[in-house]
Image (cartoon, rainbow, N blue to C red):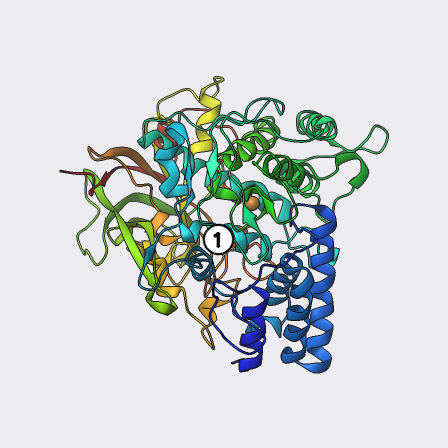
């Protein structure tokens, strides 16, 4: 438990309180005139990391009251800096882990309702333009935005090299790639094409974005008109872009004469460390700050671009709301994909004593055996209401689904128990055909749409066993699972599940795609690997193992996204038919509310 002083200081940093105490935000709370801060700018991210180190020293010497008081003081002149530093402090130091950051939902609500009348119900009113409107519900999801913000706090790019976590660069690519796979499946169900990469950096960003009532204590977010291009001088970014693309295709990082060879998934890691300009970057001059600069040039394309007024792309807590975020990240992913695609495929020759007889997806608590046939799952859109002071209410939308579980049938032919890793993916049939030739140009793209659903260690005794795993325990999601984002908007005190590390993870409600009214078709794919070699340990207590690691470790020796991190050599259906450690199952997802 932390003191009232610490709580008050944290509120001040996020612009939610005043020095006197926890006075609720009101219309007359003055906006500060900050020097401008964006975590995507290298210098700003570096300064935030330095401030976080300083907070750690103060906390050690004088305690949390003093450390947070210092952060509150800094927030008076540079709130963005103080906010990001406090986030890093709260995840990267033992003392800091006692702090609870205010939830993004509460922060968003407090500012959206700033000027609302007593008793009024407010919404953010944020929206994109044109056909992209169909995906607003997904990009605006409160917990998806919070996940993205917290990922960049758990994996900050400019902290001291010793604090950069294991496989940071590889996870930078993998986590964002999985977000893209999910986004593209949702686009498909809305009748839209997969997101178009921003391949030509001088071309139109396409749809516009209006952030509505979105703001923070130090930023007004600005709309961007449709048809704008990245703003500013793009010559440097284009050069960085060409260099990274060349590194991906030649497997050589850095300038001529100093190149570092890229190999296997360690190569993904090295490439990612350069793309994101982490402090473990080897060629800071040559490879620059590719990912962050792109965010900056898109944010700058908004109607006004000043220190206190810019596009949502300047901030990790808001960036994914903008359709352009996905276009920029699909381009970044294309560079990484071209690297992965040129690596040798997996051979799947691992010998296992355990066979996977089948998998099914069924309602939670169901005790029926997997059996033949196909499975169905229903989803629903829901609205939540978060009560603010002064009787104001903030209304938000989120996706929900029926509680489900996986059931797998296993057979262990050895004399004793064997540990295996179960890996579960969802493949959208329209984008990933199990019969298509994966060695063709279009077939090679399919693996990009494989959605990770779960990864878990199973100790299989000799003989046959049926193993049940609940969706709410998935390694992908923020755990404990949150159904309505409002449930956790005010968690504080001793609740471990509110630490920034625990709130890093994909939202439970978005674990499965929304599907369509008529039912959208998927293949559930499951695979067993040798857990003794994978080194996946006991499950993480909270947060997401797959997207956020465990502590400083990433507890899976296989490349992230395995087996879909490389091109396949044969149609997946054929691989499954000849491989006793793999299984497939038909699943259809029905979106229920749109009926009638
Ligand atoms: Cu990101």
Q: In which quarter of the image is ligand 1?
A: top right
Q: Which of 431 and 295 is in front in this view?
A: 295
- Give the x, y percent position of residue 454: 40, 49
Please give the name of the residue rendered at 57% of the width and 36% of the height, measured from the top-left corner.
302
Q: Is mark 1 on a helix, strand or loop?
A: helix
Q: Quadrant of residue 575?
A: top left
Q: Quadrant of residue 426?
A: top left
- Give the x, y percent position of residue 234: 70, 28
Using the image, determine if residue 120 lies above or below residue 137: below
Residue that extends furthest to the right in the rendered view of this protein: 257
Q: Name the residue under label 1.
A: 147
Residue 253 horizontal side relative to residue 359, left or right: right
Please give the name of the residue rendered at 72% of the width and 63% of the height, measured from the top-left corner.
51
Using the image, determine if residue 214 lies above or below residue 587: below
- Give the x, y percent position of residue 256: 83, 28
Quarter holding the C terminus? top left
Total tally of numbered discs in the picture: 1
Residue that extends furthest to the top in the rendered view of this protein: 440
Q: Nearer the viewer, residue 498 or 374?
A: 498
Q: Nearer the viewer, residue 300 or 591?
A: 300
Q: Quadrant of residue 229?
A: top right
Residue 66 horizontal side relative to residue 414, left or right: right
Residue 161 horizontal side relative to residue 353, left or right: right
């Amino acid at each position: 438990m932390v003191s009232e002083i610490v709580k008050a200081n944290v509120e001040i940093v996020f612009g939610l309180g005043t020095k006197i105490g926890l006075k609720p935000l009101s219309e007359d709370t003055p906006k500060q005139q900050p020097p401008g801060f964006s975590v995507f700018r290298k210098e700003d991210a570096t300064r935030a990391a330095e401030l976080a180190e300083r907070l750690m020293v103060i906390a050690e010497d004088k305690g949390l009251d003093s450390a947070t008081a210092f952060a509150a003081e800094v927030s008076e002149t540079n709130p963005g800096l103080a906010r990001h530093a406090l986030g890093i402090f709260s995840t990267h130091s033992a003392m800091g882990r006692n702090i609870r950051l205010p939830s993004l939902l509460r922060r968003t609500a407090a500012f959206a309702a700033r000027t609302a009348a007593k008793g009024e119900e407010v919404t953010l009113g944020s929206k994109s333009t044109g056909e992209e409107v169909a995906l607003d519900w997904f990009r605006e999801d409160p917990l998806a935005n919070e996940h993205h913000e917290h990922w960049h706090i758990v994996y900050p790019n400019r902290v001291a090299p010793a604090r950069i976590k294991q496989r940071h660069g590889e996870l930078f690519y993998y986590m964002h790639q999985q977000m893209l796979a999910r986004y593209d499946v949702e686009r498909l169900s809305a009748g839209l094409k997969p997101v178009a990469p921003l391949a030509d950096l001088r071309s139109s960003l396409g749809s516009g974005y209006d952030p509505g009532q979105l703001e923070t204590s130090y930023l007004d977010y600005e709309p961007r008109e449709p048809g704008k291009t990245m703003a500013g001088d793009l010559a440097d970014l284009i050069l960085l872009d060409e260099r990274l693309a060349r590194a991906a295709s030649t497997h050589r990082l850095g300038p001529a004469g100093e190149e570092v060879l890229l190999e296997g998934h360690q190569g993904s890691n090295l490439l990612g460390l350069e793309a994101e300009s982490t402090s473990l970057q080897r060629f800071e001059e040559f490879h620059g700050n590719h990912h962050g600069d792109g965010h900056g040039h898109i944010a700058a394309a908004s109607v006004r671009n000043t220190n206190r007024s810019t596009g949502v792309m300047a901030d990790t807590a808001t960036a994914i709301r903008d359709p352009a975020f996905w276009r920029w990240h699909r381009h970044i992913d294309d560079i990484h994909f071209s690297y992965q695609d040129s690596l040798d495929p997996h051979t799947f020759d691992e010998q296992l004593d355990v066979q996977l007889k089948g998998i099914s997806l069924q309602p939670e608590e169901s005790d029926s055996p997997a059996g033949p046939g196909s499975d169905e799952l229903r989803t629903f859109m829901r609205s939540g209401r978060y009560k603010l002071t002064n009787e104001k209410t903030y209304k938000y939308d989120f996706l929900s689904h029926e509680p489900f579980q996986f059931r797998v049938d296993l057979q262990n032919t050895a004399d004793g128990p064997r540990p295996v890793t179960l890996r579960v993916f969802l493949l959208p049939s329209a984008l990933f055909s199990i019969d298509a030739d994966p060695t063709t140009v279009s077939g090679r793209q399919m693996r990009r749409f494989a959605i990770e659903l779960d990864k878990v260690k199973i100790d299989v005794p000799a003989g046959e066993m049926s193993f049940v795993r609940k969706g709410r325990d998935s390694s992908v999601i923020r755990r404990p699972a949150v159904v309505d984002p409002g449930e956790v908007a005010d968690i504080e005190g001793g609740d471990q599940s509110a630490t920034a590390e625990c709130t890093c993870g994909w939202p439970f409600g978005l674990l499965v795609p929304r599907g369509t009214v008529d039912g959208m078709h998927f293949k559930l794919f499951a695979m067993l690997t040798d857990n003794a070699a994978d080194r996946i340990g006991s499950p993480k207590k909270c947060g997401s193992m797959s997207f956020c690691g465990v502590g400083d470790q990433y507890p899976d020796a296989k490349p992230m996204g395995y087996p879909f991190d490389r091109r396949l050599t044969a149609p997946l259906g054929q691989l499954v038919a000849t491989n006793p450690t793999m299984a497939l199952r038909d699943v259809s997802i029905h979106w229920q509310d749109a009926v009638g």
